[in-house]
Image (cartoon, rainbow, N blue to C red):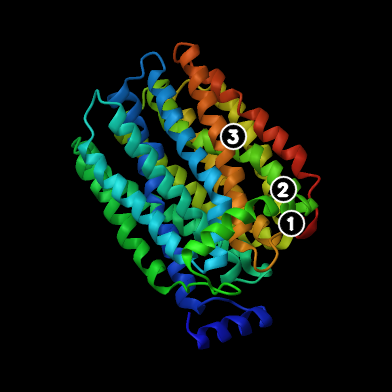
Amino acid sequence: MRSSETQGLTRAREGGGARGGGRRAIAAWVLYDFANSIYPAVITVAVFGVYFTRVVVGNDDGRGDLWWGRVLSLSMLVVALTSPAMGAIADRGGLRKAFLAAYTGLCVGAVALFATIRAGELAWPFLLAVVANIGFEGALVFYNAYLPELAPPGRQGRLSGLGFGIGYLGSIVGLLSVLPLVHAHAYAWTWWTVALFYGLGALPCLVWLPAPASPAPVAPGVAAVEGFRRVGSLVREVWAMPDLRRFLIAYFLYIDGVTTAIYFTGIFAATTLGFGDAELIRLFVAVQLSALAGALLLARPTDRWGPKAVVSATLVLWTAIDVAVFFVEGKTTFFVVICVAGTGLGAIQAASRAFVSRLTPKGKEGEVFGFYALCGKSSAILGPLLLGTVSHALGGNQRVALLSLALFFIAGFLLLQRVGGEGG
């Protein structure tokens, strides 16, 4: 970073205004949310997850659920174990932007290679799916860590909500762009479209976001050694912050339920309720619209009432939705119930990101967001693995497995009530 940029960033921090590159950087940051949202919409939820379980592996007895759960769990495990150290390395070496670019490229490249997957194979599709998810989830660690750089605490809820809202718009555009390809069963072109959409849309972010200046920039190798050494002390530091510690434990539980529900909704709709490919895409376009509405409508309340109130309310909603899904039989009823759930999805994701941002000390953004990712990704190891295992053990019965997620929402809600600080 040039010296003038460093001085500008310092002045912005002291003045409490928008930080780290101004409006162009904020626009680029939001555009990244638009671009990368095609990945979860098309790959992990609506199209590839279903394609993997039903076509590549086969899911008559829940075997596809089992292996898809393993894909998600293994990729999350890798990200969870590496995120704190990588966040520390990024902060110490000023490498946040470089890591964001590297993980983005890993995801885009792996998705492009999905075109080489053949039905009946397992090892190669499994490896590519794991690598792609590591790239996507790993990039989010460094992308999210920019939030405190771009907005002061009083505006982080709005910016976080705007990012998620534009992200849901990106999901809608992405789903609609692949709909004709899925109709034609042109799956190779579907994966290439996702890779191109994500890669091109991420470029402004990788160009215009400032490379954060570390306190004393060092060589990457030295930063790596220091970063790994910092993990142990970072655990103690985070544990010594009561409100941050309590929030991360609560987040660990409730986001497990949220993430697992997202990953398996499409598979449940296709396997248990008989949704076709086109019906799934229409379902998730509607869900993204409801999530967009939830993220935008509750952005200001997140700043006014505090993230705690918004997250608590959405956990109550998700618990009720989870119970309702257990009894759903028809496609129309499921469509309505999941769209209602979508409003809570947008709110809980945006408010959680704003919550941890408010609790993060200055200069620790990369490290704390690394821990934020550690909690989220660690919990997502257990949920998909458990749901896939239960489904397989019950001969493909997904209803009981999904109902168990309510326990995560209830436990997260109860623990969240003990968090004070700026999140309340």
Where residue 245 sits: x, y (%)?
74, 48
SS type, badge 3: helix
Instruction: Give percent across and percent down for residue 87.
Output: 56, 57
Residue 382, quarter of the rendered image: top right
Q: Nearer the viewer, mark 2 or mark 3?
A: 2
Q: Nearer the viewer, residue 323 or 93?
A: 93
- Dot 1 or dot 2: first in sequence order is 2
Q: Amino acid at mark 2?
A: Phe
Q: Is residue 64 above or below residue 298?
A: above
Task: Check whether the beta carbons of the residues at disc 1 and disc 2 lie within 8 A of each other.
Answer: yes
**What amino acid does circle 1 point to?**
Gly
Cα distance in 3D space between marks 1 and 2: 9 Å
Residue 257 is labelled as 3
The residue indicated by pointer 2 is 247
Which residue does the image show at 54% across and 76% down from the upper left?
20
Q: As rendered, which of 226 and 241 lies closer to the eye?
A: 226
| Marked residue nearer the N-terminal end (1 or 3) | 3
Residue at image position (24%, 38%) is: 182
Circle nearer the viewer, 1 or 2: 2
Residue at image x 55%, y 43%? 81
Residue under label 1: 423
